Image (cartoon, rainbow, N blue to C red):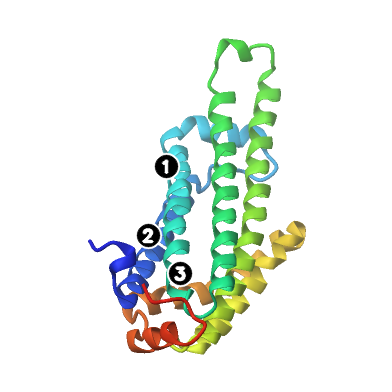
Amino acid sequence: MEPIGDSSPRYRARMAGVFYVLMLLSGGIGFVGRRGLIVTGDAAATATNILAHQSMYVLGFSGDVLVTVTYVVVVVLLYEMFRPVNRTAALLGAFLGLMACTIQAFATLFQLAPLTILGGARYLSVFTVEQLQAQAYMFLKLYSQAYGIALVFFAFCSLLTGYLIIRSTFLPHVLGVFMLIAGACWLTFLAPPFATKYFAFILPGAVGELMLMLWLLVKGVDAERWNEQARAPGRAAPA
């Protein structure tokens, strides 16, 4: 495999598409692993489900970790792709994307807490069963809240990505419009109760990211136009 800096812009774009797909698959693993285990508002049932299906719960945790890792690669590749358009905006978008990944990685730690709390260690015998179940559920709520904060950073990253696509000459501008819509949808997590209540209406906003993923995977970028924009006065030198 060629080093990122020595590869063609089309190759880098398609690799971004590949890692976008891996991120989507990892998210699917996380969803399947936790599906049906967490019962909203019922700490006892949630604790019982986790203890009865620990392997599936750990699978869900692993999927979330892989989502973070793969998106870090996507962020780096997108920075390389958009650097000729506006280096400052591309760098800011990469920074926000990496901040989102950092928060998301921290959030996944909350998923490990229930396994420790419900693990039956002797030092936990000072708590009643109900107290342990409540603590385990509390950490899952903290995970959800921290994940919502990460989505706000992803929102600003998506908005900048949309802006950069529109300003670029090597990607269809319609992709940028849909990425702006996606970013606006994720911004609703600035008000978590609203975002949670209307999540079914917000989720279609992710269509923009799906369109970008498929375009990068299948088409990549127009390499000739990318090089022209990279060589334009005031732009970064092409990699």
Residue 94 at x, y percent in the picture: 54, 63
Q: Nearer the viewer, residue 136 or 213?
A: 213
Q: Tag 2: residue type?
A: Leu
Q: Quadrant of residue 62?
A: top left
Judge from the rendering whether residue 234 lies leftward or rightward of residue 138; answer left or right.
Answer: left
The residue at 54%/42% (across/down) is 37
Disc 1 is placed on an element classified as helix
Kindly identify which residue carries mark 3.
Answer: 78
Mark 2 crowdedness (10 Å alpha carbons): few <14, some 14-19, many ≥20:
some
Of tags 3 and 2, the one toward the viewer is: 3
Q: Tag 3: residue type?
A: Leu
Judge from the rendering whether residue 3 lies leftward or rightward of residue 137; answer left or right.
Answer: left
Mark 1 crowdedness (10 Å alpha carbons): few <14, some 14-19, many ≥20:
some
Residue 66 at x, y percent in the picture: 42, 49
The residue at 74%/61% (across/down) is 190
Q: CA distance from mark 3 to mark 2?
A: 15 Å
Q: Tag 1: residue type?
A: Leu
